[in-house]
Image: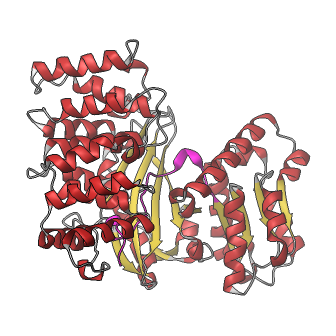
Amino acid sequence: MGKFELEGSQVEELREALSSAFTEESLKQMLRLRLNWRWDEIKKGEAYEDRLFNLIELAESEGTAENLIISAARQQSNNPRIQTFVEAYADKLIEFDTGVLTTESLLNLLTVLKKTNDFQVVAELVRHILPTIETHRSQEVKDFEQPDLSNWFKGFRLLKLLLEDYPGLEQHSILLTFVERLSKESKLDNSIKEQLNKWLQNIDPKFNSQGSELEQPSLRVSTQLTPGPLQAYLMIAVNSEKSKTKVRVIASLLCISPTGVRKEIPLHLNPESNERGVLRSRKKLPQTVAQFIENSIADNLSIPENLLGCAYYALTIELFLPIDYLCEPVDLWDIKDDFGNQVYLGSQYRLVVRSYDRVIKPGLKNAFSESWYRAKDWLAQNSELALLQDKIQHLASIECTRLGALKETLKEKIGIQITCPLPESQPEMLKFLQTILESGVPMALWTRYRELPSSEFVVRIDRFLTSELLCNPCDLLEKVRKERALAFDCETPEKHLGRHLTILWDDLERMPILEPLQSGGQRSR
């Protein structure tokens, strides 16, 4: 959540709201259960009001005041003082396009939503418009279905969700589409429908949902088979837990037909658990990836409707790894083929490493987005190999004292080809990888084999760096897969480039919507 700053009078208003909503004991329980904070560790004061003041100051100093406010609103969702405070500062608690919407218009819509006779209708519509919400925003889904939560809080959570958490879509477009579709729900009272239509007309009289980006062609699959394979992307995101010995893993399967129809399917290894993702030791990460692959094929790609009218599929594994995992030899992880034989992941499937940090860190994502669009436009206009070579940074040595200069150079490139070994020192290697991510450059290639001559690396890797392949990622990754398969079958596999090649290649068109994969998404003290 963003940094919520309070002025003097607002601190007093929040303190009074919390005081009216909670006794000291109930506040203690809320802080422990919702935020994993311990009331006894808050700087003590002689009176309850003083300790509330200290709590607010602590939350502000740590940038978690917004988290505190929303958690309090959830716990006491019917309390009028809490509701009044949230609504008074809705423009700070919800980020939205002020050129289209106003705080007043949002509060008017919230008023309508809290009058709905059956909020389950609203929840079902959200699932229909945003099929991946159960994976990416599981807590919101649970909140929508909690009978003890007020419609006011559910409506607030819904507005925040639609306006903040899906940045790939126009904010006002997704909200207007939602309202327009909700106004046609037969289960809603006519008075609610009328109010929704009136709200919609006040915002944009010319709005037409038929032109919205949110039309769901994936729900209308042709019965005729489409020529060409379904491109299936198994997106597996990994984040280190604070203990350093555990990782949290979450996955979804993105299916794209040759006609551009898309469908994203959340994957669960333990459907009975309410925990988001799965918690694994670092040692068991390869086994977990293998389980996700098996489940995606057996439980999803074997279902005809998930093939979106295609006769067969081509599967790409995309591993979103934190920076300290980027040099893991993931292509050498063992999996089993259809006959139960042990094979290498990189030789069995198209495999690419991607940056988890670029997904969750706004600054890195922004730098990458700028570079990605620039690279895409350049490749669309240039196909000559000589020109392409100028856009690839060839790095034959790494000077860790001049990484700032390297970062500025990479901002103008579409890729970096590292023909020397990465630094052996872990801190220096991390600084080097940070430079690559901060520059925004979409692609980086390097070898993990320290004895491969740089000239041989350049010759072999240049076969992959053509404009045609860079414009067709699936073709490039298939070529790399074949190279890896050949490496494992040659006389001296340890000297073959395919056995040691790492490709970091991020694509803005396939950026999963993920919050940091921490347990519950909450901080611990």
Residue 169 point in image, percent of width and height: 46, 36
Magenta residues span: 505-525
Residue in the picture at 52% in, 48% down: 510
| Residue 26 colored in magenta in the image | no
Q: Main secondary structure of the magenta part?
A: loop
Residue in the picture at 81% in, 51% down: 412
Q: Residue furthest top?
A: 206
- Foreground pick, 418 / 498: 418
Task: Classify residue 310 by image quadrant.
Answer: top left
Q: Is residue 223 visible?
A: no
Quadrant into which the N terminus falls: bottom left
Residue in the picture at 68% in, 54% down: 442
Q: Is residue 478 visible?
A: yes
| Residue 523 colored in magenta in the image | yes
- Foreground pick, 45 / 256: 45
Horizontal side of residue 368 vs 260, given as left or right = right
